């Protein structure tokens, strides 16, 4: 395969057990024994060196980090039969978050979190800044897209039974990520500081306040005082761009780690393959893997 | 590394069984903890102190506004002759300073009415903040009611709830007269019988057991007495 030879050796697909030594078919890497007897020209040698350079750099890094084992394990991990488009909802949510993060960073370059200047700075972004309306629009509509994708992803996980053992912890992390996403949506809504965002935040904070005993204090904490004031906006801004994004990034890391570690589930309509050893069919149906939820990386759920 | 391991290592290190074994094993005579254990505890303790030194001030900084009460603010809104008994006059004044228009709020003010059994010579300033979720209500002259545009809350002439989702009457502001000018001051909430209580956020019940379920916040002013 031509493409395989372009992938640096440390990142090549690991060989299947019992399929030879895992050497890639095609032109073998030149070494002393198989090198042609005639000396290559200088131009050829230079070309070969240039071709090897990316692999050499990667090998240099790999020798010092041992990252290739982790990367090949992640990139070439096995997925169950029946994996379909519904399994892309998690990645789609991740892409939506990355889009929010990137556009948010650039919006922060023009935005002023001050009650007297916030509205004008948003108007400046929309009306004067080159592509400002586009970037602001991506961030504004992207937030809705992210919330919708989070719920679709959650629905997929629920209806495919992918929250069951051993993936309960990943469901819990996902719920925290859902809450953090809603926090982002809530705190971001105030930032344009127009009539709509002002009154929506007033209503949202007051809904928080209706919780018995702690509610009134929670409202005061969110507003930084008894009324929506100067520090409320900067408080929301800090929560929106510093506190919650950091927590989301950390939890996405944990979420993805568990996805790779535990593998994904097969769709519930798929039955497990029949084991090679003959067994009575009644035993088969009662088996723990009868729902097709075997982890993809071949490990048993108990591992 | 657990104590258990330390003890085992200590037991092995003594080697010959005929020599006097420390009791418990791994500890020297009279020791209450091993050196390793002592260092572990000390380092963990120091780390905890260092962490607390960073986290506690930051958290205190963030929650301090809950316990802070701003300066009491009074603003003149017009001469006493502007206000009558049978209808409200709308005034706009600053409730929160230094944030421009966002800090302004609206009150509907009238002179107290004998027909409604109110103490004469006072001024009633009803906040336009809906007691449901805080939308701005409007006094509709023809109906004699306050009506909220958001979720359909309706209040009577005195601000008592007569329809919709609000949980209590409209808030009021303290009033006083200085140099012939009516002045409005801090906000307070009222019970369903219009008894003044400390200001609550919209959506929170007042009176009875609700005074404990929605405790008064330190950031608000005491209600006017009487």
Image (spheres, rainbow, N blue to C red):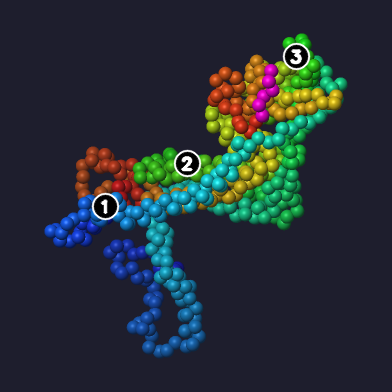
Residue A107 relative to residue B94: left or right: left
Circles 1 and 2 on the same chain: no
Task: Nearest to the eye among marks 3 and 2: give it.
Answer: 3
Residue A18, percent from left and from top = 28, 64
First in sequence, mark 1 or 3: give its number.
1
Residue B105 relative to residue B219: left or right: right
| Labels 1 and 3 touching (C-beta < 8 A) | no
Q: Is residue B30 above or below residue A46?
A: above
Name which residue lies at 76% across and 31% down.
B74
Residue B71, percent from left and from top = 71, 35
Chain letter, disc 1 residue: B
Q: Is residue B156 visible?
A: yes
Q: Nearer the viewer, residue B21 or A232?
A: B21
Label annotation for residue B30: 1
What residue sits right under mark 2 in the picture?
A175
Measure how far apart labels 3 and 2 are at the Cα level: 55 Å
Measure how far apart labels 1 and 3 are at the Cα level: 82 Å
Residue A91, percent from left and from top = 49, 51
What residue sits right under mark 3 in the picture?
B119
Residue A208 relative to residue A5: left or right: right
Task: Nearest to the eye among marks 1 and 3: give it.
Answer: 1
Circles 1 and 3 on the same chain: yes
What segment carries the magenta color?
A: B221-226
Measure how far apart labels 1 and 2 are at the Cα level: 53 Å
Q: Secondary structure at mark 3?
A: loop
């Amino acid at each position: 395969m031509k493409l395989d030879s372009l992938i640096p050796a440390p990142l090549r697909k690991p060989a299947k057990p019992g399929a030879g030594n895992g050497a890639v078919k095609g032109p073998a890497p030149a070494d002393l024994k198989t090198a042609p007897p005639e000396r290559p020209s200088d131009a050829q040698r230079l070309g070969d060196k240039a071709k090897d350079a990316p692999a050499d750099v990667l090998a240099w890094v790999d020798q010092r980090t041992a990252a290739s084992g982790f990367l090949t394990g992640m990139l070439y991990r096995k997925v169950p039969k029946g994996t379909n488009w519904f399994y892309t909802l998690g990645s789609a949510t991740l892409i939506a978050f990355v889009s929010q993060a990137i556009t948010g960073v650039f919006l922060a370059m023009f935005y002023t979190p001050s009650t007297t200047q916030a509205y004008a700075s948003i108007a400046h972004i929309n009306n004067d800044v080159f592509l400002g309306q586009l970037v602001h629009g991506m961030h504004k509509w992207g937030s809705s897209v992210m919330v919708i994708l989070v719920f679709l992803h959650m629905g997929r996980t629920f209806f495919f039974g992918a929250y069951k053992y051993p993936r309960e912890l990943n469901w819990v992390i996902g719920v925290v990520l859902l809450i953090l996403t809603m926090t982002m949506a809530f705190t971001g809504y105030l930032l344009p500081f127009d009539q709509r965002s002002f009154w929506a935040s007033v209503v949202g904070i007051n809904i928080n306040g209706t919780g018995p005993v702690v509610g009134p204090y929670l409202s005061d904490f969110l507003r930084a005082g008894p009324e929506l004031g100067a520090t409320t906006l900067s408080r929301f801004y800090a929560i929106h761009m510093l506190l919650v994004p950091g927590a989301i990034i950390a939890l996405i890391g944990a979420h993805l780690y568990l996805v790779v570690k535990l593998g994904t589930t097969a769709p519930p309509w798929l039955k497990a393959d029949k084991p090679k050893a003959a067994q009575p069919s009644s035993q088969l149906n009662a088996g723990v893997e009868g729902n097709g939820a075997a982890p993809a990386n071949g490990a048993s759920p108990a591992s | 590394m657990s104590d258990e391991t330390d003890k085992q290592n200590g037991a092995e290190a003594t080697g010959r069984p005929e020599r006097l074994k420390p009791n418990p094993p791994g500890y020297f005579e009279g020791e209450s903890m091993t050196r390793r254990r002592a260092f572990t505890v000390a380092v963990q303790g120091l780390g905890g102190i260092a962490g607390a030194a960073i986290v506690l001030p930051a958290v205190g900084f963030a929650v301090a506004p809950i316990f802070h009460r701003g300066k009491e603010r009074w603003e003149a809104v017009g001469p006493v002759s502007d206000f009558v008994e049978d209808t409200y006059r709308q005034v706009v004044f600053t409730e929160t300073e230094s944030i421009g228009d966002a800090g302004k709020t609206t009150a509907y003010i009238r002179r107290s009415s004998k027909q409604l059994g109110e103490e004469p010579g006072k001024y009633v300033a009803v906040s336009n903040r809906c007691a449901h979720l805080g939308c701005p209500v409007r006094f509709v002259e023809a109906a004699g009611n306050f009506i909220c545009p958001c979720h359909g809350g309706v209040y009577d002439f005195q601000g008592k709830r007569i329809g919709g989702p609000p949980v209590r009457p409209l808030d009021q502001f303290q009033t006083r007269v200085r140099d012939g000018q009516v002045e409005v001051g801090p906000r307070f909430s009222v019970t369903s019988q219009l008894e003044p209580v400390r200001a609550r956020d919209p959506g929170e019940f007042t009176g009875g057991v609700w005074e404990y379920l929605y405790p008064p916040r330190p950031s608000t002013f005491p209600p006017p007495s009487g």
